[in-house]
């Protein structure tokens, strides 16, 4: 992307809102954990310190230990890798599939549009969690399967958004201008429609990171997401859910990690949407 | 006088009907007749004005010529070649010869492309020249419409309406077209800018010799620039003549009414203003016979029943009216 005056102005507007900055810092913190997990984690996340089971937060274990005596801080740091890569993969998949479908529906219109949008409606009619559970119970635990289940249920938001935007752009005269010059469909789609769709797509992608993180946590909590030996936030909640009263830290901190990450993406997404809204441009 | 020359563009019985609903067991099919059989020719290097109220189908007609809208019936010939059903590949070649200038300079330029990219897009699409050569040609075009060469690196939103329309004109001229369809190119601009842009267009025509099909809702703007003028009403052309003849002796009552609406800058001159009664009828249910009969002050019984013929009243002055 070209860094022009427009982009600079958008960046300035973006961070004028303190909430956006908080969101950005939360995402950065998350990214830091993802990239530097082996360097900052005090323990091996899978190492069990059996004599120290359910130790409250102290100098040795900053956030305490879980039922098997594993360090909660280390598990949260490593668990961020699952959440983040999963969010990215699901968003990338949904973006690719949803944008292709939405763009085709919006640009070609007519029967193509009706068919693709009814297909989208079918997928929207299922509650996401239940649909994902059904897929997981057929395919079994594992990262790839979680990505598959969440992509299959999560692309509809992109398709509908892109279709609506493409529909309104198609009526703009610059598209007709390109046609009158002799431009073919690929050129109109990729040079004229897509660049003008980037702003809403970026916003949707940022906000869309939150949903798969939450759903993965829910699936793993229910025992049909990630396998139990891999440190993931949903899995941590699942292991210690019976000890909520006696070992509050073993539930609270993983829960906070999920909440903060989701909050970060939502706040930043909101800020992005406001900053990229053309109506605010002066 | 145009008789011996071959027309550049010849449009015959062009129709564009929009089906509003397909109809069914108890519903009648409703069809909007945006353009309902119009014929005209444009000769090389001339300007043909096409005038009418909003909604009369003039823009639709203009867009049909470039096949931006697919016509329902009729035929169009560009330099003798039938382009009504031409394939996409054929049309691509034809589009080098016909270009379009849009009404709204704000929505007709892609906000994510620089001026250089916009003006250079015709070259990119048709694979004409590249690199330094292309940049030079773009700069020459931009300069020709009165913008500086450094505008090429800037985005459309940094320009005023008049400047944006100049960018649109530069884009339309890139391929050296023989015909430019101008869809109300100045009506979205401030009055002070309108004449500047019109003058630029006339200068360019003198220099490059292309023909204009100039679509407008006001006779006044068209008088300045056109050699001949066609007047449209409800999807039909009702009168077509040399500009002078049309303004000095209009034959159709509708043209007469339009002319009387042009303000005269001299308060001493008393003029009879013909106020048309009622609104333009809906193109879904056009009146029977002559479409203008319910608003015409000369209407006769025959006007209600039979559609007037399109006839030559002498000297290339065409009209469709029972009075003549």
Image (spheres, rainbow, N blue to C red):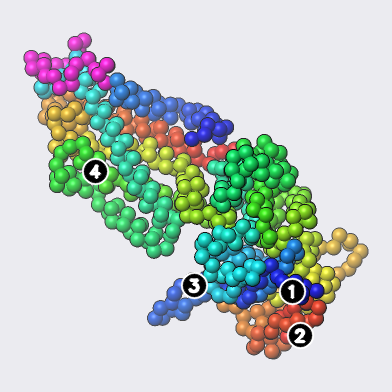
Front in this rendered view, residue B80 or A188: B80
Binning the other alpha carbons within 10 Å of mark 4 as few (below 14), some (14 to 19) or many (20 upward) gives: some
Q: Secondary structure at mark 2?
A: loop
Comparing labels 4 and 2, the label whose residue is closer to the camera: 4
Q: Nearer the viewer, residue B103 or B225?
A: B225
User: Foreground mark, 1 or 2?
Assistant: 1
Location of mark 2 (residue): B323
Q: Circle 1 — which element? A: strand
Q: Position of residue A76 (x, y in %)?
A: 23, 24
> Could you tell whether B195 is left or right of A158 in the image?
right
**Residue on which disc 3 sits:** B19
- Point out the frontmost of discs 3 and 1: 1
Say if residue B168 shows up in the picture.
no
Q: Read off the chain for label 2.
A: B
Query: Magenta stretch?
Result: A37-60
Q: Are marks 2 and 3 on the same chain?
A: yes
| Residue A148 badge | 4
């Amino acid at each position: 992307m070209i860094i022009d005056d427009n982009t600079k102005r958008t960046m300035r507007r973006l961070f004028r809102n303190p909430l956006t900055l908080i969101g950005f810092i939360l995402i950065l913190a998350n990214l830091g954990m993802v990239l530097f997990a082996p360097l900052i984690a005090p323990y091996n996340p899978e190492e069990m310190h059996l004599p120290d089971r359910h130790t409250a937060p102290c100098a040795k274990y900053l956030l305490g230990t879980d039922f098997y005596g594993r360090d909660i801080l280390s598990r949260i740091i490593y668990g961020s890798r699952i959440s983040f890569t999963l969010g990215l993969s699901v968003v990338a998949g949904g973006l690719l599939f949803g944008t292709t479908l939405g763009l085709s529906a919006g640009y070609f219109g007519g029967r193509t549009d009706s068919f693709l949008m009814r297909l989208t409606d079918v997928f929207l009619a299922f509650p996401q969690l239940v649909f994902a559970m059904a897929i997981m119970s057929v395919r079994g635990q594992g990262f790839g399967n979680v990505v598959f289940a969440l992509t299959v249920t999560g692309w509809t938001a992109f398709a509908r958004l892109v279709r609506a935007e493409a529909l309104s752009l198609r009526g703009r005269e610059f598209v007709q201008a390109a046609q009158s010059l002799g431009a073919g469909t690929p050129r109109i789609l990729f040079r004229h429609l897509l660049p003008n769709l980037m702003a809403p797509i970026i916003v949707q992608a940022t906000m869309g990171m939150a949903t798969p993180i939450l759903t993965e946590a829910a699936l793993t909590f229910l025992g049909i997401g990630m396998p139990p030996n891999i440190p993931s936030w949903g899995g941590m909640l699942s292991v210690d859910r019976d000890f909520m009263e006696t070992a509050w830290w073993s539930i609270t901190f993983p829960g906070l990690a999920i909440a903060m990450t989701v909050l970060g993406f939502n706040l930043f997404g909101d800020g992005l949407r406001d900053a990229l809204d053309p109506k605010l441009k002066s | 006088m145009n008789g011996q020359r071959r027309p550049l563009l010849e449009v015959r019985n062009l129709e564009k009907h929009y089906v509003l609903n397909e109809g069914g067991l108890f519903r009648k099919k409703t069809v909007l007749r945006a353009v309902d059989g119009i014929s005209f020719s444009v000769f090389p290097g001339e300007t043909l004005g096409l005038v009418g109220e909003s909604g009369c189908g003039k823009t639709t007609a203009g867009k049909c010529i470039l096949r931006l809208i697919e016509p329902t019936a009729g035929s169009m010939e560009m330099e003798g070649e039938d382009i009504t059903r031409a394939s996409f590949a054929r049309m691509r070649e034809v589009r080098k010869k016909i270009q379009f200038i849009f009404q709204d300079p704000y929505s007709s330029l892609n906000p994510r492309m620089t001026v250089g990219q916009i003006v250079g897009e015709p070259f990119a699409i048709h694979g004409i020249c590249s690199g330094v050569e292309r940049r030079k040609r773009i700069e020459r075009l931009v300069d020709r419409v009165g913008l500086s060469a450094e505008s090429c690196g800037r985005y459309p939103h940094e320009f005023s309406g008049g400047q944006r329309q100049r960018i649109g004109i530069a884009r339309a001229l890139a391929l050296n077209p023989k015909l430019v369809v101008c869809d109300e190119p100045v009506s979205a601009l401030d009055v002070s800018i309108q004449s500047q842009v019109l003058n630029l267009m006339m200068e360019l025509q003198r220099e490059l010799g292309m023909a204009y099909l100039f679509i407008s809702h006001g006779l006044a703007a068209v008088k300045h620039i056109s050699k001949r003028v066609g007047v449209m009403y409800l999807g039909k052309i009702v009168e077509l003549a040399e500009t002078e003849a049309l303004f000095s002796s209009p034959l159709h009552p509708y043209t007469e009414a339009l002319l009387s609406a042009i303000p005269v800058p001299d308060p001493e001159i008393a003029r009879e203003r013909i106020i048309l009664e009622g609104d333009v009828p809906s193109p879904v249910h056009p009146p029977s016979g002559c479409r203008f009969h319910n608003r015409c002050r000369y209407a006769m019984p025959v006007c209600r029943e039979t559609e007037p013929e399109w006839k030559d009243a002498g000297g290339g002055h065409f009209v469709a009216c029972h009075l003549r």
